[in-house]
Amino acid sequence: MKNDIRTLDDVKILVNTFYGKVREDDALKDIFNDKIEDRWPEHLEKMYRFWQTVLLDEHTYHGSPFVPHANLPVFAEHFEQWLILFYSTVDELFEGEKADRAKWQGQRMAEMFNYKIEYYRNNPSTTIL
């Protein structure tokens, strides 16, 4: 039986494992590596804080998660692949209420980001904020 996501260390295991897969995935690696370049440690720290806030109710993330993604060259198929990797990572490592919440939150974010990116792509005169 697997444990649920309970601590910051659990969040770090989830984030590190997931982004390790992203960095090797044929559909996603170039998008992430081109944007993040050599700033992976900073990106991972930000993701730890984001998921710590979302899953553990420890409010350490401040900012707007959408804005850095707004101009990425991504489409529905990229979000689908992101979700496949995210779900499989959560399921491989954890089970329980927080693990289910992580998958629900990931699905919600992917849908919202995809919708908003498409909206701004089709309405270029609209300010992204």
Image (cartoon, rainbow, N blue to C red):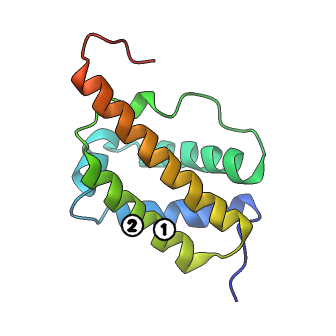
Whether the residues at callouts 2 and 1 have beta carbons within 8 Å, the answer is yes
Q: Quadrant of residue 61?
A: top right
In the depicted view, which residue is nearer to us: 110 or 5?
Answer: 110
Residue depicted at x 59% and y 77%: 93
Q: Tell me the element at label 2.
A: helix
Q: Which residue is mark 2?
A: 84
**Which amino acid is tagged 2?**
Ile
Q: The residue under label 1 is which amino acid type?
A: Tyr
Q: Is residue 47 left or right of residue 111?
A: right
Indicate left or right for 2 with 71 as reference: right
Most foreground residue, 22 or 40: 22
Residue under pointer 1: 87
Residue drawn at x 25%, y 47% is: 31
Of the pair 16 and 92, the residue shown nearer to us: 92
Q: Position of residue 125 (x, y in %)?
A: 26, 10
Q: Is residue 30 above or below residue 12?
A: above
Alpha-carbon span between mark 2 and mark 1: 5 Å
State whether residue 98 is above or below residue 47. Answer: below
- Locate residue 90 relative to residue 8 in the image: left or right: left
Identify the disc placed on residue 44: none
Give residue 102's position: percent from left, percent from top.
61, 59
The location of residue 114, given as percent across then percent down, is 36, 41
Tell me the quarter of the picture where residue 73 sits. top left
In the rendered image, the quadrant that contains the N terminus is bottom right
The residue sitting at 30% across, 24% down in the picture is: 120
